[in-house]
């Protein structure tokens, strides 16, 4: 796909509020970030496997077809976030494009750090209507699209169908958390070398706190009430946090405080756990040709309690820095990297370990879930995945109104600060070095400090 190229306009760096810069982090710029020349762009990118496939296909297809050189700077997630926040706040134009999430993009747009993508959205060839609506909504601000998803995800429960059949257990399509806890206990009792469930315990606002917050939402909790009063050590939040910590300590994986997505994926593939609650993107790896559990796993909706749906919503998406001197080239790259054409290239790249149907950057386009070639290998998890994404309600994920958006996070810049510290507290509870109630009391204080700032603004 090739968008119509226009002459780039000169852009002036914006004067930005110091408070936003501080809130977004202060990590330094990484090596390799160089100013792009004419018809070349520099892309700051997280080091996920699907991004590695992108680098190869970009050189083979996009650059060959358009003449636009793409210089990739690849970093681990937190380093990438720190670099992006500093770079985009300073508007130095070193990076033209960066992978950002639906957490950052709305307030980066409000701050004036990124360009809108209305020209891409209006291009019939790109087909914005094919992008799943929750993704478009999550990447928009003030009625304009500011990001295009590379891939998207929600969360659901993955379980070993063969083991459930062996022990006479029947997994419902929409399980409750109480049912899941009961299944985990029975598996632990019946299988000497297997734990009932794997849950994230590693400290991080996008790690253990993401999973815990979805449980908080469905068990009647919230981070803040409508008046920005923190609700962390009381009510539904307290119930959910204690439930999560107790479940993973009693029936979860050993060393849970060090486990994130990759560790739980490995545990599930190696037959060490019977269930795994995590990102829908994990299904592709479980069903990959070389996976030991291929064909043995079932996929059902995220466990719930008081709400009908409980899955999160997340996307790694492309954002273009407002100060980029290569706006049209950057937009052409974004339109290609998020296109139907690109998904077809990945699907056809079966000779590469990072290619093939199970590695398609899915979770963003409705047409993906109508593609017979994709459904041939993804049929077991395709419908649960797209349903989870469509049912995700970022603006109303719980049982009460709240002054922020976000399902597995609080959609405000300072969440990276108080959320990260709270994640550490809850990881300590999972490891057993402190009680859950003590961890929540500390989290309450951290959250209320931010809530008090918001109250002063009202």
Image (cartoon, helix red, strand yellow):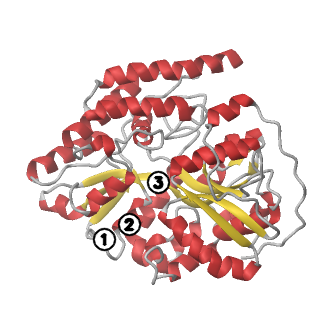
Q: Which of marks 2 and 3 is nearer the N terminus?
A: 2
Q: In this view, does 270 lie above or below 224?
A: below
Q: Mark 2 to mark 1: distance in Å?
A: 7 Å
Q: Which of marks 2 and 1 is nearer the N terminus?
A: 2
Quarter holding residue 320 = bottom right
Q: Which mark is residue 291?
A: 1
Residue, x 53% and y 61% (percent of image)?
Answer: 363
Mark 2, residue position: 285
Taking depth in this image into account, of 273 and 419 the one nearest to the observer is: 419
Q: Mark 3 to mark 1: distance in Å?
A: 24 Å
Q: Position of residue 101 (x, y in %)?
A: 59, 50
Residue, x 47% and y 54% (percent of image)?
Answer: 388
Q: Is mark 2 in CB contact (under 8 Å) with mark 1?
A: yes
Is residue 221 visible in the rendered image? The answer is yes
- Which quarter of the figure is the C terminus placed in? top right
Taking depth in this image into account, of 202 and 159 the one nearest to the observer is: 202
Q: What element carries label 2?
A: helix
Left or right of 193, for residue 331 = right
Q: Mark 2 to mark 3: distance in Å?
A: 18 Å
Q: In this view, does 128 lie above or below 140?
A: below
Residue, x 66% and y 55% (percent of image)?
Answer: 98
Is residue 234 visible in the rendered image? The answer is no
Taking depth in this image into account, of 66 and 395 the one nearest to the observer is: 66
Q: Residue 423 carries which label?
A: none
Quarter holding residue 110 = top right
In front: label 3 or label 1: 1
- Which quarter of the figure is the N terminus placed in? bottom right
Q: Residues within 10 Å of mark 2 (few under 14, many from 20)?
A: some
Q: Position of residue 394 (x, y in %)?
A: 56, 42
Q: Position of residue 86 (x, y in %)?
A: 67, 42
Mark 3, residue position: 388
């Amino acid at each position: 796909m090739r968008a119509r190229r226009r002459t780039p306009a000169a852009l002036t760096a914006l004067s930005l509020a110091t408070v936003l810069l501080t809130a977004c982090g202060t990590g330094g710029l990484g090596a390799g970030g160089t100013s792009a020349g004419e018809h070349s762009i520099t892309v700051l990118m997280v080091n996920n496997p699907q991004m590695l496939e992108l680098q190869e296909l970009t050189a083979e297809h996009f650059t060959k077809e358009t003449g636009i050189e793409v210089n990739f700077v690849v970093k681990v997630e937190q380093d990438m976030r720190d670099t992006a926040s500093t770079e985009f706040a300073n508007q130095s134009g070193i990076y033209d494009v960066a992978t950002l999430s639906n957490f950052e993009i709305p307030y980066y747009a409000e701050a004036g750090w990124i360009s809108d993508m209305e020209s891409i959205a209006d291009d019939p060839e790109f087909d914005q209507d094919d992008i799943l609506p929750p993704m478009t909504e999550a990447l928009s601000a003030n009625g304009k699209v500011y990001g295009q998803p590379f891939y998207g995800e929600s969360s659901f429960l993955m379980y070993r169908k063969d083991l459930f059949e062996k022990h006479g257990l029947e997994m419902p399509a929409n399980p409750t958390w109480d049912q899941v806890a009961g299944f985990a206990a029975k598996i632990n009792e019946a299988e000497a070398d297997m734990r009932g469930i794997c849950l994230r315990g590693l400290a991080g606002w996008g790690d253990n706190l993401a999973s815990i917050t979805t449980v908080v939402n469905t068990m009647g909790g919230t981070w803040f009430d409508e008046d920005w009063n923190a609700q962390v050590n009381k009510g539904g939040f307290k119930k959910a946090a204690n439930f999560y910590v107790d479940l993973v300590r009693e029936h979860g994986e050993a060393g849970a405080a060090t486990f994130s997505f990759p560790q739980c994926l490995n545990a599930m593939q190696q037959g060490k756990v019977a269930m795994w609650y995590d990102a829908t993107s994990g299904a592709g790896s479980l069903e990959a040709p070389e996976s030991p559990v291929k064909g043995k796993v079932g996929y059902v909706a995220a466990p719930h309690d008081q709400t009908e749906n409980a899955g999160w919503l997340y996307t790694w998406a492309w954002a273009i820095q407002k100060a980029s001197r290569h706006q049209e080239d950057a937009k052409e790259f974004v339109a290609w990297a998020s296109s139907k054409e690109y998904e077809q290239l990945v699907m056809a790249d079966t000779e590469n370990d990072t290619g093939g149907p199970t590695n398609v950057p899915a979770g963003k386009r409705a047409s993906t879930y109508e593609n017979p070639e994709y459904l041939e290998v993804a049929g077991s998890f395709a419908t649960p995945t797209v349903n989870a994404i469509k049912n995700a309600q970022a603006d109303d994920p719980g049982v009460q109104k709240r002054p922020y958006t976000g399902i597995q996070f609080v959609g405000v810049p300072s969440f990276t600060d108080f959320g990260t510290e709270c994640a550490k507290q809850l990881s300590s509870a999972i490891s057993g070095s402190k009680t859950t109630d003590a961890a929540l009391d500390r989290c309450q204080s951290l959250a209320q400090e931010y809530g008090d700032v918001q109250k002063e603004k009202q």
